[in-house]
Amino acid sequence: MFKNYHHSNKAIFITFFFLSLFQKVYAIDVYNSGFSYLGAANTIESSFPYSYKLNAKVDGVGLFDKELSKKINTQSYSFNLITNKLADLNDENAVSFTFALQNERTSIEKIGNLHKLLIQLDGQLLFFDFNSMSIVASFPVNIQYNDAVKSYPSENYIKEQYRKIFFDEMKVNLFTSAVKRLEEVTLKRRYKNYIQVVDSKISNKAFAQSTIQTDIERKRLTQVFAQSFSQFLSSNQDISVLPFIKGHAIGNKLSGKYSNGEVYTLELPEPDYAIKLDVLAFKRKLFSEENAGKSYIYAAQASFDFYEPLSGKSYFKEKLFNGSTKVIPSSQTSIDHWATFNESLMILFDKFTKQLNSPTKQWLKKHSGSTKSYKSFKQLKEVINRCR
């Protein structure tokens, strides 16, 4: 009895020993190249007016590099992160990593007696082949910071909120969010297939609900929606999603600039699967009414088209909607409809990308009104699996 038990333990030990050796041999070495900005070098300062000024150099090192390094070194990852030296050109398998800021958005709107400040930052965890300077994998990171003040926010007040987002240990911190996502990443040296949101639109009907009616804001919204959907798809399915580059790149070349001023250009692979996103409508409907207040359903509708660019084959093309309930107390004199519509849309993105794990007829009928596209809905699971 004892003899069998002993041999069993020995076999288990040997198995784990060889497994650990296997993992050690095949772990990916990733060289940390620090923080950077995406965009042409001559537009960085104007594209990131608040972030750029905060990223001052101390002893020749950018403050963002220091902050990122401080947080990144305290965690463990699915790859070997090397932070004490740069990648070697002689290493054919050298993979580098940069956390690249892609968008900075600041908006202020008056709601009743308050001024609402919205700060949105979109970034990318970019892994690239150091020799060919081509992207191996990309994982989006987005954060939103909301604040409400009685008087119109001054420049100094806005700067202070940005400082908190980058340097304070509060709930909304860009580097904390980036490192948390980095911990979740399952990195591969090579991927069989890539997926990317290639187009994003908002209809006139939906845009009419926006509080800022400018062409620039419309363009920004389409970028925000594309990047938000990319983030939900990436995190909920644990896959690499190529960056949404409309307005950010020339051809398939993605330009960037490190904190030290060094410029780089990365080549993006062609997506094997593409996604077109079109936000169609936002609607509000009274759900119930009592003395204490009213309850409304805020609905968001968007169309999604997953297809193969090379062949033109469409895997899934459907309009989906989501309804979120919001209670408005009788004492509340002003309502931020736009924020609630946006929240409903983000919930749709979240639910949809989670549902790809196990597509069901019930979910499809609830969010599209029909089950006609169920067969193609199930195909999406196969498409996602090919991108792992």
Image: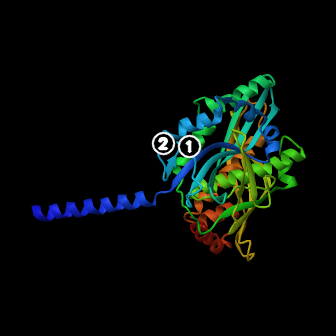
**Residue 386's x, y, as percent?**
58, 69
Amino acid carrying label 2: it is Gln
Which residue is painted at 70% across and 41% down in the image? 121
Mark 1 in CB contact with mark 2 (< 8 angstroms): yes
User: Height in image: 282 above or below 356?
Assistant: above
Q: Nearer the viewer, residue 49 or 295?
A: 49
Q: Horizontal and vertical percent for residue 176?
A: 57, 38
Q: Toward which corner of the image does residue 234 lie, by quadrant? A: bottom right
**Display coloring:** rainbow
Check disc 2 and report the residue beneath it.
75
Is the C terminus in the top left, top right, bottom left or bottom right quadrant? bottom right
- On the rendered image, what quadrant is the N terminus found in? bottom left
- Is 143 drawn above or below residue 267 in the view shown? above
Residue 376, by quadrant, is bottom right
Q: Amino acid at mark 1?
A: Val
Question: Whole-percent x and y of residue 263?
Answer: 73, 46
Alpha-carbon span between mark 1 and mark 2 = 8 Å
Q: Is residue 286 visible?
A: no
Task: Please name whichever residue, 317 or 189, is drawn nearer the observer in this view of the structure.
Answer: 189
Provide the secondary structure element on which disc 2 rests. Answer: loop
Give the labeled residue for mark 1. 179
